[in-house]
Image (spheres, coloured by chain):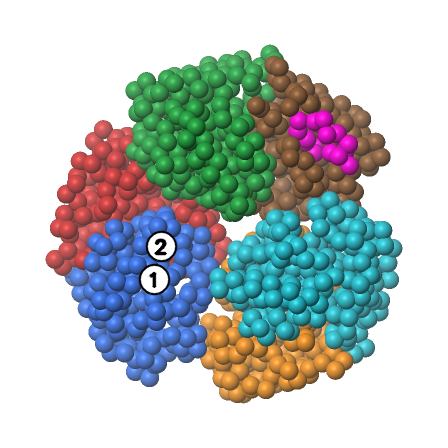
Chain colours: A red, B blue, C green, D brown, E cyan, F orange
Amino acid sequence: MSGPILFINPNSSQSVTDGIARALVPLRIVDGPAFEAVCIAHGPPTIASAEDAARAAVNVADMVRARPDCSAYVIACFSDPGLEVARSLTSRPVLGLQEAGILAALGRADLFGIVALGPASVARHRLRIRQMGVLGRMVDELPLDSASAEDVGHSDAIFEQTVHLGRRLKDRGAGALVLGCAGFAPRRAALEARLGMAVIDPVQAAGAMAIGAVLR
Amino acid sequence: MSGPILFINPNSSQSVTDGIARALVPLRIVDGPAFEAVCIAHGPPTIASAEDAARAAVNVADMVRARPDCSAYVIACFSDPGLEVARSLTSRPVLGLQEAGILAALGRADLFGIVALGPASVARHRLRIRQMGVLGRMVDELPLDSASAEDVGHSDAIFEQTVHLGRRLKDRGAGALVLGCAGFAPRRAALEARLGMAVIDPVQAAGAMAIGAVLR
Amino acid sequence: MSGPILFINPNSSQSVTDGIARALVPLRIVDGPAFEAVCIAHGPPTIASAEDAARAAVNVADMVRARPDCSAYVIACFSDPGLEVARSLTSRPVLGLQEAGILAALGRADLFGIVALGPASVARHRLRIRQMGVLGRMVDELPLDSASAEDVGHSDAIFEQTVHLGRRLKDRGAGALVLGCAGFAPRRAALEARLGMAVIDPVQAAGAMAIGAVLR
Amino acid sequence: MSGPILFINPNSSQSVTDGIARALVPLRIVDGPAFEAVCIAHGPPTIASAEDAARAAVNVADMVRARPDCSAYVIACFSDPGLEVARSLTSRPVLGLQEAGILAALGRADLFGIVALGPASVARHRLRIRQMGVLGRMVDELPLDSASAEDVGHSDAIFEQTVHLGRRLKDRGAGALVLGCAGFAPRRAALEARLGMAVIDPVQAAGAMAIGAVLR
Amino acid sequence: MSGPILFINPNSSQSVTDGIARALVPLRIVDGPAFEAVCIAHGPPTIASAEDAARAAVNVADMVRARPDCSAYVIACFSDPGLEVARSLTSRPVLGLQEAGILAALGRADLFGIVALGPASVARHRLRIRQMGVLGRMVDELPLDSASAEDVGHSDAIFEQTVHLGRRLKDRGAGALVLGCAGFAPRRAALEARLGMAVIDPVQAAGAMAIGAVLR
Amino acid sequence: MSGPILFINPNSSQSVTDGIARALVPLRIVDGPAFEAVCIAHGPPTIASAEDAARAAVNVADMVRARPDCSAYVIACFSDPGLEVARSLTSRPVLGLQEAGILAALGRADLFGIVALGPASVARHRLRIRQMGVLGRMVDELPLDSASAEDVGHSDAIFEQTVHLGRRLKDRGAGALVLGCAGFAPRRAALEARLGMAVIDPVQAAGAMAIGAVLR
């Protein structure tokens, strides 16, 4: 299985897609499959609403069909749109950013928390996390004041707000913090140092799990 | 953090330890940390009983103390002996084989099953899986007729029995199969091909998660 | 709120849609809102796969937007495609067939079972039922040999197979049986009489709950 | 099955019973069964304590035996006294106010809250809700300052206090509010308008579910 | 608190009541409170149905009121009728046979099973066990062919059938067996010896917990 | 089975061990087995860390092996170190302090709380309580400011702090308070009187359950 591991960013933002590709560079395996990150040109600029997620699921399905050459697929949006349908279309591994981020956190500490991009996604994520059956290990999901995926890896204000939310979650028992969006990778290590707890970038978590899934 | 990712095999078997090292070769990261696998010379030849696991926990703790140079630790025994104590002794990532194997399975399918080395460990594993809070996603754990970790990667009889147990779990809804022991890696891909479902080698799953955990 | 209660059948089958309308006739409220059943002309003939469900979610969303005159919406497909997105698009009640059928069963007995149209949908339904948090009250979901929604209300063979599956579920403790598809209404009462347990037609269950939801 | 749907109010209050009957008027089905509301003349004036509920269970059982002519029974008290025993005495549908109110809420939103008549009933209700297996979807149950069922549909002070408690529950994530008592129906729509969330009157919710249960 | 620990047998059987008293003899504490066992003369000869249990709850409440001299109360019927109401009537400890039997089992093994007196009580018990929140640790409850509480401590046929059911539960993972009725005490030790697993007589389990609850 | 019930205190404190023995005096059974309390001379002075608990598990195992004369074993440390391994080494009853304390609380009220000796143990206890499957019935575990087991039965300051924490737990719904350490027995009754709720000393709870477990 020599095809790339395809990260499908279901929004149309090239800069977010480029950020995903950069976040995966340190995960390059000797003689292993390459990572490739694509966006959906006709997708919305961001996946902010339930409707965005519903439409993204269809676009993700179309992309999986269009790229039978890949060794694995990662849905690079924290709502994991189209995860079920993508898995029904291929026998190859299909991972979701939210699932991978949370699973990585579960492997690091008993309780985790999530920092969400904004208030609107918290309830939508909870549905998925209960579906995963791991809501009992989540302290809480706390939202930023509606940040954008393009900014989270660069803005100092978002960094400080993330530290603030992370501390609240840590005080309530969280031992690992999941960053609820693609784009945070450039700041992950700095957040971990400031917070003194495991901090999970879901893109890198998904990349690592994808490597494990395509091993032969 | 340039130290190796240390796989601590708490039994004394050099051949199992060598197998662990070999299973990790395909996971070598360009410019990333090396993997190192060690065993506990004075440990028991295998971790078969609750008492073996209790003693292993102490040996694992001693090893973590003795190796402050590592960037991450993996407890390379499917009972995850000493996971809690090791995490209390270092701020670096500490992963367990059982946790990593199960978490990898949760990222591949809704329901998973486990094939155990033998009947004695099933009840012990269930305690841990309920502690993880994910028992509701396990179809069942079915035991081999007391195989040994040294044989599971090589014996054709064990291979066929694993296929048989895997099929029973798949018939009951499992979409991913966790191999409940170090040593299965040489047969993982063949099992996956025969069963038509995701098959997880916990050593490689833990290796991949460890890579994700030490990224900077 | 004098608009109709709109049943949105996301497949293109007019005969199934007509059956839905007929099933709702006995629920006509004096001076209450009317029921209206529509299908999605460009939808698939049946919602059989995860991809069908993903595409149906988008079609359901479009229909909700196109019909702001309604007092309530019911997604008339047992996979409840688009339930989340529809709720995000209107403040009026939005019900799903699966949810309503299961909730009606929960109000009749401690444990319920489901008869599914075919094997393919069982795993998809389980994701939703765990998301609802009520998997612990389901005995099992057993599939028919891939029946069609157009036949379930009429075929004697399907009737007998449903009796057979219902008995197996009753023997395992189920006190209520949910028929996992629109179309069963003409046979519901006969099934209840044969099985000696509560039998829930999800269309009628959703119709009754919708009436309760639009009361003033 | 042409007998009435019998609402059994296990307390002796005629005015509460009359209120129940009035709340059901908008649910009259064309050619369907009538609703009838009765109280237990020798019951306590209100069901406030565990002992009241225990005695009510026996009275409810006696009433079910005394009225074999009914097509369905609803226990019109939010503690659902006698629900199990009533179900054991008849093969016809038996619904409880608490169950029906909560199930209706589960069909409207992911999380619900309850406003209780007073502090004493919160712990008793929790036992039942855990028994139903849906405690994980309840945000909280908050009590009024010991209001009476006779007042809740009329008092402006209780209305304002209910708005206050409903807002607290909404702020904590509740998408539906269950009114924890018979008698609220005259204010339900006004509460819904003020709170901007689904508000469930359990009498009407039970009435609607009962209609669904007696359809032929 | 020098009053007796009162075992309230809610049925009218004097021989069952005498058996309860005998089962408690080995639990006599030096200088501790005495045990006293009473029955309800006007109660039913056995608590077999949901209606029996509902009426028993009221009788238990009356008895608790009538005996304010006791240091603790045990409801000596495996359905725990009136447990909630009795607790609301006194600040002294009130235990139930089912709760005590199950809690004792949970202190002995990870998984337990129950042998019920007959098929009719299994569903009723499940409601209580889910209410306790420990259904996840029960393998199953298997019924005898409708034995009577008066016979279970003496009949060889019931003994052999209990061994048979206990073996089935042990094979499925149970490490402790709860005898689902008062009266089994004379055979408890023999059952334990035959089955090779912990066997819990709920009367003695409740007696031991009651001693712990009244210590000063 | 005439051997003593052995309480194994895995730390080296003779004064704590003596306190355990004193706490059990009121539980002396007429003609029943004696209680004996031993400490591990080479154990740590207190079991404060995960490493202490891991080492204690091995010491407990050694002690169980060394004392085959006992009729039952109680691990007299609130972390229950070595519970699994001890059970694997003997067919006689093995109880843990934490399990027994919590199970006693579950037999007294719907919700319980714990007062811990200090902040460090709260997270470790939570793992065990989730493993038991009863986390849903715990309100919270609140820590003292790092008290010692030698002081908790005597210090007035600790008494007042325990009252304070107990009140907070009671206000949040707890009906029983578990004292999270050996040594509290001299103050248990006074705490119960001050708090007006059931207060469980885990040593006495375990002693009472052990008596029930060794009955013949």
Which residue position is annotated with label 2? Answer: B169
Q: Chain of mark 2?
A: B
Indicate left or right for E68 with B154 as reference: right
Which residue position is annotated with label 1? Answer: B115
Q: Give the percent coordinates (x, y) of residue C135.
A: 48, 45
Which region of the structure is painted magenta?
D62-76
Q: Chain of mark 1?
A: B
Q: Give the percent coordinates (x, y) of residue C71.
A: 51, 18
* Residue A39 on the magenta segment: no
Q: Residue at x 44, y 19 (%)?
A: C19
Q: Nearer the viewer, residue B92 or D60?
A: D60
Q: Please tell me in which quadrant of the rendered image residue A30 appears.
A: bottom left
Q: Give the percent coordinates (x, y) of residue C215.
A: 59, 20
Q: Nearer the viewer, residue D157 or B34?
A: B34
Q: Please tell me in which quadrant of the rendered image residue C85 appears.
A: top left
Q: How far apart in space, not on screen, are marks 2 and 1 (Cα)?
A: 9 Å
* Residue D63 on the magenta segment: yes
Q: Amino acid at mark 2?
A: Leu
Q: Amino acid at mark 1?
A: Val
Secondary structure type for disc 2: helix
The reply to whether callout 2 and callout 1 are in contact (CB within 8 Å) is yes
